Image (cartoon, grey):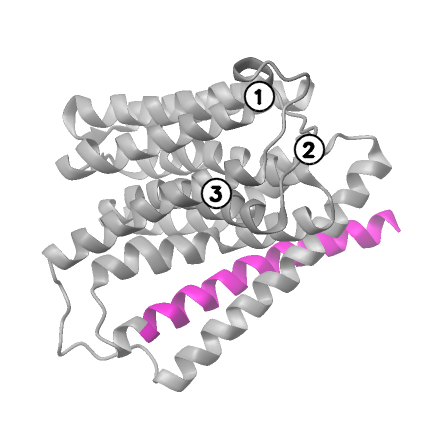
Amino acid sequence: MLAINIILLIVGFIILIKGADFFVDGASSVASNFKVSKMLIGLTIVAFGTSAPEFAVSVKSLLSGSGDIVLGNVIGSNILNILLILGSSAMFHSLNVKNNTVKKELPITMLITTLFAVLLSDHIFDNNVVNCFTRGDGIVLLLFFSVFLYYLISMSRKKIDVDQDEKPAMSLSRSFIWTIGGIAAIVLGSNAVVDSATYLAKAMGVSERLISLTIIALGTSLPELVTSITATRKGEYDIAIGNVVGSNVFNIGIVIGLPVAILGGIEKIAFSYIDLIVMIASAILLFIFSVKDNKISKKEGLVFLLIFVVYYTYVILT
């Protein structure tokens, strides 16, 4: 039974990743067919596509009562996005960061990350005996994301970059098939991942926090990792940065905010405040590195990777 669940875990991750690939390709082609701005495609459709695995895993975990996996999935993915993904991307080439990103998107990322941590810390700020994440907390994050989405749409309307002569990668009907098929694969893969990971955690005596912060967070962040590294190697540094920034905001606002707002809160959640500190510190460090000279150098990428190694060594050993 143990071997079967390990196989299911691996197969589930493969289905998740390939499902996200199909979804992003299909959704992007749908947008091209309708002549939607490329900026809006990149900041919304691509961000949603690469974060779809996290969303699917969170919904499945919440429905099955595994609240710790939901939180660990989001916290772990946001830490991975900055420390591992941007760190790895910067090792290929220094990442140029535009002024608008430094002045607006990165501060927004720090703000929603800090807000998320505060909402989780009832024991500190509300003097509660245990920490919990209520439906009201989910609604607050969802409203914040709505403001961010409005900002993205407003920005896209200011600079229209639609190439009217560009031909879509596939027909509209095929685009819809790929989009729907990708979503179906993401849901199927998430079921396999959550079920097998939960079984392995119980069978091996490993906490759900450790499983969600490592295996699940890494597996569901692979779409962001592949996208950002590929974009960096092609010289598309804005996509590499935007993918991570957009995904982190999406993870907090939609991946956890939306399911909790609809399905209900999470009671008696268990997490380490070290996790929250590292998550906030990563966002702040990204801003500091970017504001200094509008780029993330290879040395700064190495710093990200070293912090990642130290943090995950701590997670595994505790």
Position of 75 relative to 193 (above/below): above
Separation of disc 1 and disc 2 at Cα? 11 Å
Which residue is the site of mark 2? 267
Q: Are marks 1 and 3 in contact (CB under 8 Å)?
A: no
Residue 223: % across, % down: 46, 52
Give the farthest residue toward the right.
1
Is 115 displayed left or right of 123 in the figure?
A: left
First-in-chain label (1 vs 2): 1
Which residue is the site of mark 3? 139
Residue sitting nearer the eye, 225 or 100: 100
The kind of residue on which mark 1 rests is Asp
The kind of residue on which mark 2 rests is Glu
Magenta span contains residue 4: yes
Residue 254: % across, % down: 47, 48
Position of 141 relative to 33 (above/below): above
Which residue is the site of mark 1? 122
Magenta span contains residue 285: no
Q: Residues within 10 Å of mark 3 (few under 14, many from 20)?
A: some
Separation of disc 1 and disc 3 at Cα? 16 Å
Asked whether the viewer can see residue 282, the reply is yes
Q: Kindly identify which numbered label has been placed on residue 179.
A: none
Magenta region = 1-30
Q: Secondary structure at mark 1?
A: helix
First-in-chain label (3 vs 2): 3
